Image (cartoon, rainbow, N blue to C red):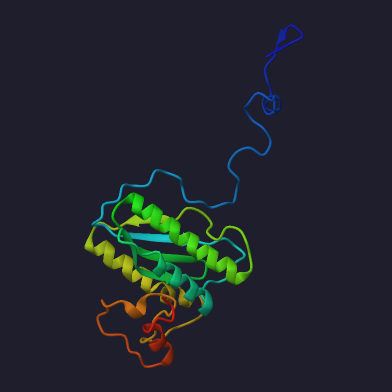
């Protein structure tokens, strides 16, 4: 850099002064502390592969594991089904949703999930008397390409609440299943679910979905 006809070396402070012609400026760059899903290109999806999808909600909404909210979410999921897109299994967790989804291709998956997020967001905002975003960022997806991956993903989604229960000091009995999920309709259990309580029978008759 030239100053008064002499060449001088720039200091770090000189280099960091905004010039108005690009380069560094105060407040620029990625904000610290915000966890986001990377915006890389989505992998191409083939119809024969199901997908495990996770959708997180913004802070301030509170837990989704409330009867009325879970029912709203379940109905929004059911209304999102098309010939090219459907949710096979799902579970409503405290601050996120898990779903096993089938779609004919990547475009159908994107449109189906986008429509489902919009339906869920409108219903939740209306019920909670709020406005603004409901989902925190892009959904996370994992294509399931083997029978083992599919089995593990279904197990993870349907048993997610049981898995996290000990963290909150809760232990569920052997016959308990998650009422805020599609557990009641899943027909792949080793033994049939016992419907030995009113709330279990209510789940089977459509209290959530």
In depth, the one of 36 and 12 nearer the eye is 36
Could you tell me which residue is drawn at 47 percent across and 51 percent down? 37
**Residue 190 placement (x, y as % from top left):** 24, 80
Left or right, 94 with respect to 153, comes to: right
Confirm whether residue 204 shows in the render.
yes
Left or right, 76 with respect to 14, comes to: left
Taking the view exactly as shown, the residue that stands out farthest to the right is 4
Confirm whether residue 66 shows in the render.
no
Could you tell me which residue is drawn at 39 percent across and 82 percent down? 177
Left or right, 148 with respect to 15, comes to: left
Position of the C terminus by quadrant? bottom left
In depth, the one of 1 and 184 nearer the eye is 184
Could you tell me which residue is drawn at 27 percent across and 85 percent down? 192
**Residue 32 placement (x, y as % from top left):** 60, 47
Vertical relation: 50 (above or below) 76: above
Vertical relation: 55 (above or below) 174: above
Residue 103 lies in quadrant: bottom left
Residue 201 lies in quadrant: bottom left
**Residue 26 placement (x, y as % from top left):** 69, 36
Vertical relation: 35 (above or below) 97: above
Could you tell me which residue is drawn at 60 percent across and 39 percent down? 29
Position of the N terminus by quadrant? top right
Residue 158 lies in quadrant: bottom left
Count of numbered tags = 0
């Amino acid at each position: 850099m030239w100053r008064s006809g002499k060449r001088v070396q720039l200091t770090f402070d000189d280099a960091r002064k905004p010039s108005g012609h690009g380069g560094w400026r105060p407040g620029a760059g990625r904000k610290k502390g915000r966890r986001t899903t990377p915006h890389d290109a989505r992998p191409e999806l083939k119809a024969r592969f199901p997908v495990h999808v996770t959708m997180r909600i913004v802070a301030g909404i509170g837990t989704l594991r409330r009867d009325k909210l879970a029912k709203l979410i379940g109905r929004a999921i059911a209304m999102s089904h098309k010939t090219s897109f459907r949710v096979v299994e799902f579970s409503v967790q405290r601050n996120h949703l898990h779903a096993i989804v089938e779609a004919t291709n990547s475009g159908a998956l994107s449109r189906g999930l986008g429509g489902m997020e919009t339906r869920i967001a409108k219903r939740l905002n209306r019920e909670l008397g709020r406005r603004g975003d409901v989902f925190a960022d892009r959904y996370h997806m994992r294509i399931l390409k083997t029978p083992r991956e599919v089995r593990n993903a279904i197990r993870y989604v349907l048993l997610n609440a049981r898995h996290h229960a000990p963290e909150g000091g809760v232990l569920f009995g052997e016959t308990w299943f998650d009422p805020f999920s599609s557990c009641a309709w899943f027909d792949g259990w080793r033994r049939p679910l016992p419907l030995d309580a009113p709330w279990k029978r209510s789940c089977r008759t459509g209290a959530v979905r």
